[in-house]
Image: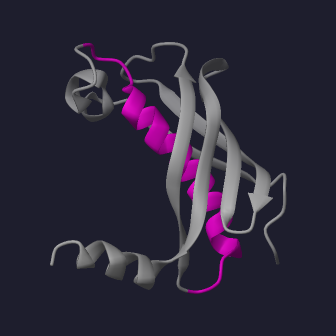
Amino acid sequence: MPLEIGLKGEACVEVVPENTAAAAGSGALPVFATPCMIALMEQAAMTSVQPFLAEGQGTVGSRIEVSHLAATPVGMAVRAESELVEIDRRRLVFTVKACAGEELIGEGRHERFIIDNERFLQKAAAKLK
């Protein structure tokens, strides 16, 4: 089955001390860290398309533009959602959002590229030589 516009994904996490801004180093307060919100959005997008890729393929994030709109304290659950809105050969574009309960806490756009996992890792490893 091919990738299609409209494909949706979801990822959830509970806010714990380890994913707060204070722990991530992105702030000093014990609230959900922006880098952790972004990672959750990327996870929603990545896992939504993975079942539709050929064996040995994956995706890598190449661009993300998001607004973090509200603070979320330790103990709350955060749900990220993605929707595939554009396919341009290997380039995939998603709208993403994150909610804590019914409150929208973040939103934006995310771009990923389909890659051959082994070739990608070989190129990365070659940089060490």
Membership of 89 in magenta stretch = no
Whether 16 is drawn above or below 91: the answer is above
Number of numbered discs visible in the structure rendering: 0
The image's colouring method is one colour
Q: Is residue 57 visible?
A: yes
Residue 98 in the figure: left or right of residue 29: right
Residue 60 placement (x, y as % from top left)? 50, 61
Image quadrant containing the C terminus: bottom left
Q: Nearer the viewer, residue 114 or 79?
A: 114
Q: Residue at x 38, y 34 (%)?
A: 35
Whether 101 is drawn above or below 52: the answer is above
Whether 10 is drawn above or below 127: the answer is above
- Using the rendered view, name the quadrant where residue 26 is placed: top left
Chain part drawn in magenta: 29-55
Image quadrant containing the N terminus: bottom right
Residue 17 in the figure: left or right of residue 54: left
Whether 84 is drawn above or below 75: the answer is below
How would you classify the magenta stretch by its main secondary structure?
A: helix
Membership of 33 in magenta stretch = yes
